[in-house]
Image (spheres, rainbow, N blue to C red):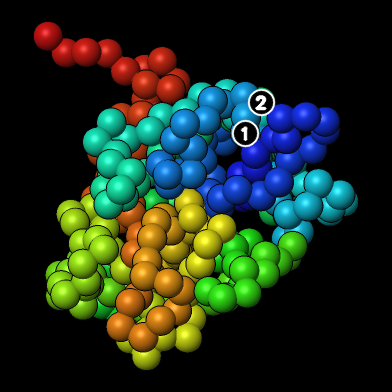
Amino acid sequence: VTIQTKFYFGVGSYHRCGGSIIDSEHILTAAHCVTGLSPADLVVFAGVLNNTQESSEDTKVVRQVTELFVHEGFVYGPLINDIAIMKVSPGFPTDNSAVKAIPLRQDVAPDGLICTVSGWGSLGDSDGTMPQNLQVVMVPFITYDTCRYIYSNYTEGSIEPGMNCAGFLQGGKDACGGDSGGPLVCGGLLTGVVSWGEGCALPNFPGVYADVAYYKEWIERQLLESKGEFFLRN
């Protein structure tokens, strides 16, 4: 999905981040995409390849965000615990083949597994061109330990628990600005949430993602709470 920020004056919205539908009412995204915003600021387009207000695809579904659940341990600078859930109302239709929830990965993906990352983010680090149509690239998965080693001499940030990576060490394909919050899908399972990286597609700096399997219990807890089924145990 494309998560859009409403214009403060006038009608309409513009692409802000990506996200993934995880059930009929909830979208998984990055915490840094929604921090400092209220639900009323955000609208979601699902079932579209074109992210503009004017797109007229038959499968397009537009929903207002009604609640935000940002990880309580989120730290903006180093983007630790960069994960959040958005609730929309009404829920997504169940009869639209282009609007489907994606199952979450429950375990660690193997190093080198070929994954896809998609979004409407910048086409390059330098020109900043933002496409209107969804872009998809294939990248190999990199486990936490391997990625931590790759980034070990990097001074601007570090690979912390709850992060994983994907990309080619020679560079060339990657997520970029505007792809944040979007899906890293490996073997048909939502495996990562686009979070950060040094530049875009640079050699030796693979893209960094929030690790969906690591946050499995947090995600489940927020969904229960959102549905009013969460009770504190004495």
- Which circle, 2 or 1, is nearer the viewer? 1
Whole-number angstrom distance, CA of label 2 to CA of label 1: 14 Å
Q: Is residue 196 above or below residue 38?
A: below
Say what amino acid the circle numbered 1 marks: Leu
Measured as percent of width and height from the top left, residue 195 is found at 39, 56
Q: Of residues 196 and 223, which is closer to you in this image?
A: 196
| Circle 1 SS class | strand
Query: Residue, x 54% and y 25% (percent of image)?
Result: 38
Residue at (16%, 75%) from the top-left corner?
A: 153
* For residue 210, above or below residue 149: above
Which badge, 2 or 1, is on the more N-terminal residue? 1
Vertical arrangement, residue 60 with respect to residue 117, above or below: above
Residue 151 position, x and y percent, is 21, 73
On screen, residue 183 above or below 99: below
Q: Give the quarter of the figure containing the C terminus.
A: top left
180 left or right of 104 in image? right
Lateral position of residue 72 relative to residue 83, left or right: left
Query: Is 133 on the left-hand or right-hand side of 154?
Result: right
Q: Which residue is mark 1?
A: 42
Q: Which residue is the site of mark 2?
A: 90
Q: Residue at x 21, y 77 (%)?
A: 150
Q: Position of residue 144 (x, y in %)?
A: 20, 66
Q: Nearer the viewer, residue 74 or 189?
A: 74
Badge 1 density bin: few <14, some 14–19, many ≥20, Cα 10 Å: many
Which one is nearer the viewer's eye here, 141 or 129?
129
Mark 2: secondary structure: loop
